[in-house]
Image (cartoon, rainbow, N blue to C red):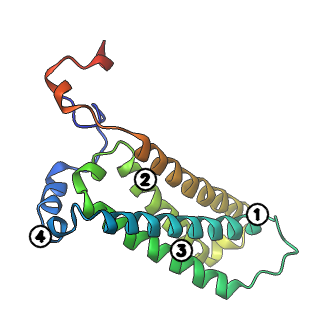
């Protein structure tokens, strides 16, 4: 029998999502449209801010905007605040509907790309020996830009993906014909 979004094998285990879906906090949140709207708004604002700062910083590391005087410390502070807002609101959105969110085809790849992006953004620049090499710096910069762009692509895919009609579960899956 296909899962809610088809027969995609790569998703979070239902055994992890079920306790979240039945938790008291989730049951308190579910159905509160105002809360859901606020979480989506803050998530989009956080993603936009974070991606904008990451793009600006990484493109500058690649040599674009080299002459621009950008205040580094305030930019990093705002980027980190945007990331915190994105992660907190994203956790709230997952808690709002764990099964509906966690079973999306691109949700697990999105989480893996977020982890990769965080390693590239916060871990790689701290490796002083490799950071001095221009090839390493350019490769990690390009990889970070690609990872965060793919995170947004996964989010878009998840948003437009529609679940199967529950009435169709008992019928033959038209995608297998």
Task: Depth check: give the residue in front, 36 or 60.
Answer: 36
Report the side of 120 relative to 91 (left or right): right
Q: Tag 1: Cα neighbours inside 10 Å, few (<14), some, or many (≥20)? A: some
Mark 4 or mark 2, which has the lower sequence index? 4
Q: Secondary structure at mark 4?
A: helix
Q: Secondary structure at mark 1?
A: loop
Q: Tag 2: Cα neighbours inside 10 Å, few (<14), some, or many (≥20)? A: many
* Residue located beneath label 3 in the image: 122
Question: Where residue 107 sits in the image (x, y, percent)?
Answer: 37, 50
Cα distance in 3D space between marks 4 and 2: 27 Å
* Residue located beneath label 2 in the image: 110
Residue at position x 15%, y 65% in the image: 27
Mark 3 or mark 2, which has the lower sequence index? 2
Mark 1 or mark 2, which has the lower sequence index? 1
Cα distance in 3D space between marks 4 and 3: 34 Å
Report the side of 174 relative to 89 (left or right): left
Q: Secondary structure at mark 2?
A: helix
Q: Is residue 62 above or below residue 102?
A: below
Cα distance in 3D space between marks 4 and 1: 48 Å
Mark 3 or mark 1, which has the lower sequence index? 1
Closer to the eye: label 4 or 2: 4
Residue at position x 50%, y 54% in the image: 151
Give yes or no for contact between labels 3 and 1 (Cβ–Cβ under 8 Å).
Answer: no
* Residue located beneath label 4 in the image: 24
Q: Tag 4: Cα neighbours inside 10 Å, few (<14), some, or many (≥20)? A: few
Residue 9 visible in this rendered orientation of the protein:
yes
Cα distance in 3D space between marks 3 and 1: 17 Å
Closer to the eye: label 3 or 2: 2
Cα distance in 3D space between marks 3 and 2: 18 Å
* Residue located beneath label 1 in the image: 62
Give yes or no for contact between labels 4 and 3 (Cβ–Cβ under 8 Å).
Answer: no
């Amino acid at each position: 029998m296909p899962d809610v979004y088809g027969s995609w094998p790569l998703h979070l285990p239902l055994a992890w999502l079920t306790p979240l879906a039945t938790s008291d906090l989730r049951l308190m949140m579910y159905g509160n449209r105002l809360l859901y709207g606020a979480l989506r708004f803050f998530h989009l604002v956080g993603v936009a801010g974070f991606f904008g700062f990451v793009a600006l910083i990484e493109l500058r590391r690649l040599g674009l905007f080299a002459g621009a005087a950008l205040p580094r410390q305030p930019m990093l502070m705002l980027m980190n605040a945007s990331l915190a807002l994105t992660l907190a609101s994203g956790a709230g959105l997952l808690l709002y509907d764990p099964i509906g969110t966690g079973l999306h085809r691109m949700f697990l790849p999105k989480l893996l790309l977020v982890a990769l992006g965080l390693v590239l953004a916060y871990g790689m620049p701290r490796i002083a020996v490799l950071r001095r090499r221009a090839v390493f710096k350019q490769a990690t910069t390009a990889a970070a830009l690609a990872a965060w762009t793919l995170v947004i692509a996964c989010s878009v895919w998840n948003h437009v993906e529609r679940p199967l009609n529950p009435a169709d579960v008992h019928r033959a899956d038209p995608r297998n014909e």
